Amino acid sequence: MPTLFELISPFLIGGISGCTATTFVQPMDTVKVRIQVRSELKGQGQTINVNTVEIIKDIIKTEGPFGFYKGIGAALLRQVTYATTRLGLYRAIDDHYKRTHGRSMIFWERCLASSFSGFVGSIVGNPADLCLVRFQADTLLPEAQRRNYKNVFDALYRIVSEEGLITLWRGSLPTVIRAIAMNLSMLTTYDQIKDIIVSLHGKGKEDYMDKLLSSAAAGIGCAIASLPPDNLKTKLQRMKKDPTTGQFPYKNIGDCFLKTIKREGVTGLWVGLPVFYTRVGPHAMITLLVQDTLTQMWNPPKKKN
């Protein structure tokens, strides 16, 4: 029978791992969102620069170095909710398999567990994710249309009071798709490749280099699989009603998908991929390595009598 600490430790470790990684990669996440927003505005006919270097220079010039950490409160809240749930639930399921079946999950079981964990995590984390996107994109709106949230709690309060409670889950469908794609390509890939490497070198036990290589591969998979739904999510979460028509620019995720392809082409779904990888790749690597390290520290293998 597992102890209470053994039951909750996967969730504690998941939250700490996600927050640690986010603290390091938040600047690239801000740049990623600006690229997606500017690409959308350019597709609508506006003359706007989407060059990564120019965007970085513009942030430094207009907002200073702290501009890269705009919305960090929402980003950390997102990890406390989203990462805690998706990472903790996956490891809790894996721990259950080890206790009841005497083994880790096999590939198809990992796929199901990571997809389910990503789905639940995305629902829990969507409100904070919505706030984060709005913080990062706010300065690109005309001054009269900016929301100017004071902090993440002010954002949550105003969104509910001004737009209704259900708005906190706007863009939740692409968020769910993104989370499933990310969890599947991150957690399943990491565990599967790590098992393959260990079996190939014949040591019978994983070492730090095995974890590093596996996490790097997982980061690449994350970036490629999750960028299209991330792109659509950003557009849906930041959209505002047109002052003239009173209509939102997108009716739903399908409409957003078709309009994106029409304006930006199919490759527009992967706009900013290099920047996205510099955010997602290191984030995945740091998260997985911190998670494994803390798991070994807090839950060392039990010695057999």
Image (spheres, rainbow, N blue to C red):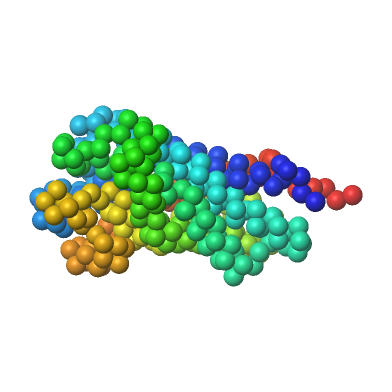
Q: Position of residue 208 (x, y in %)?
A: 60, 48
Asked if 181 appears above or below 140 in the picture, the reply is below
What residue sits 28% from the left and 48% below the top? 238
Q: Position of residue 240 (x, y in %)?
A: 23, 49
Q: Position of residue 259 (x, y in %)?
A: 21, 65
Seen from the viewer's position, the closer of residues 245 and 223 is 245
Q: Position of residue 281 (x, y in %)?
A: 43, 51
Seen from the viewer's position, the closer of residues 259 and 202 is 259
Q: How many marks?
A: 0
What residue sits 69% from the left and 55% below the top? 95
Seen from the viewer's position, the closer of residues 21 and 160 is 160
What residue sits 26% from the left and 65% below the top? 255
Seen from the viewer's position, the closer of residues 87 and 207 is 87
Query: Is residue 134 toward the left or the right of residue 248 in the image?
Result: right
Query: Is residue 70 toward the left or the right of residue 87 in the image?
Result: left
Asked if 170 appears above or below 263 in the picture, the reply is above
What residue sits 40% from the left and 34% below the top? 153
Indicate the quadrant where residue 162 lies.
Answer: top left
Asked if 143 appears above or below 301 in the picture, the reply is above
Query: Is residue 246 toward the left or the right of residue 91 in the image?
Result: left
- The furthest residue to the bottom: 108
> Would you say residue 279 is visible in this rendering?
no
Asked if 90 appears above or below 13 in the picture, the reply is below
> Would you say residue 138 is visible in this rendering?
yes
Query: Is residue 202 toward the left or the right of residue 269 in the image?
Result: right
